Image (cartoon, helix red, strand yellow):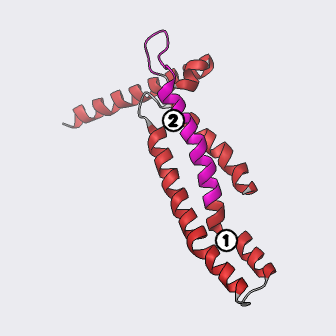
Amino acid sequence: MGRAVKVGGPAGGLVGLLADQGAQAADLAMYVTIGCGAITLMAGFIWFGKRLRKLRAALAGGKITQEELEKATESNGWPVAFAFGLVATVILGLVMTEQKLMPKEDEGGKDRGVIATLEPSLQKMQDSLFKAQRELAGCRQQGNSRQG
């Protein structure tokens, strides 16, 4: 679980930050959290419900040794996926909850997301990102009108 916390914490925080930055475009945090939760449930079911149970039965039956069980447990990707998914789901769930509970509108009435509302430098970055997005959309519309 230690490896997953080292990766899952920063990755979940980064995805939460990106979802919060894109709060004007879409509410991604809910969908990403649901996806992480589904992956976590699937990995937990496969690992705890099937694979680990079979390994422990093989250990009890004398088919494998304790060292082989530990080696199989360490090299298997399902417990890592479960731990990563659990950490990411918890972090994303907190970000999503914070987005729903805290007021997000700035003085201009724009919905910026929680983190961008609390940090003015992120507001500037968000403004420049959405300005570029609007300019790109305008270029696409001009290109489509010329073709038509």
Instruction: Identify whether 130 is placed above or below 90.
Output: above
Screen quadrant of the C terminus: top left
Position in image of residue 141 (x %, y %): 29, 31
Residue drawn at point x = 48 percent, y = 55 percent: 38
Residue drawn at point x = 54 percent, y = 29 percent: 98
Among numbered discs 2 and 1, the one appearing first in the sequence: 1
Instruction: Identify whether 68 is placed above or below 108.
Output: below
According to the image, label 2 marks what residue? 96
Residue drawn at point x = 56 percent, y = 23 percent: 116
- Which dot marks residue 29? none
Position in image of residue 39 (x %, y %): 52, 58
Q: Secondary structure at mark 1?
A: loop
The residue type indicated by label 1 comes to Asn
Question: Which residue, as the protein is rendered here, is positioned at the far top?
Answer: 107
Residue sitting nearer the eye, 87 or 50 = 50
Horizontally, residue 141 falls left or right of residue 126, namely left
Residue drawn at point x = 66 percent, y = 61 percent: 80
Looking at the rendering, the stretch of residues picked out in magenta corresponds to 82-111
Disc 1 crowd rating (10 Å Cα; few below 14, some 14-19, many 20+) is: few
Q: Secondary structure at mark 2?
A: helix
According to the image, label 1 marks what residue? 76
Give the alpha-carbon distance from disc 2 to disc 1, as whole Å. 31 Å
Horizontally, residue 3 falls left or right of residue 114, namely right
Residue sitting nearer the eye, 129 or 1 = 1
Disc 2 crowd rating (10 Å Cα; few below 14, some 14-19, many 20+) is: many
The residue type indicated by label 2 comes to Met
- Taking the image as drawn, is residue 35 in sight? yes
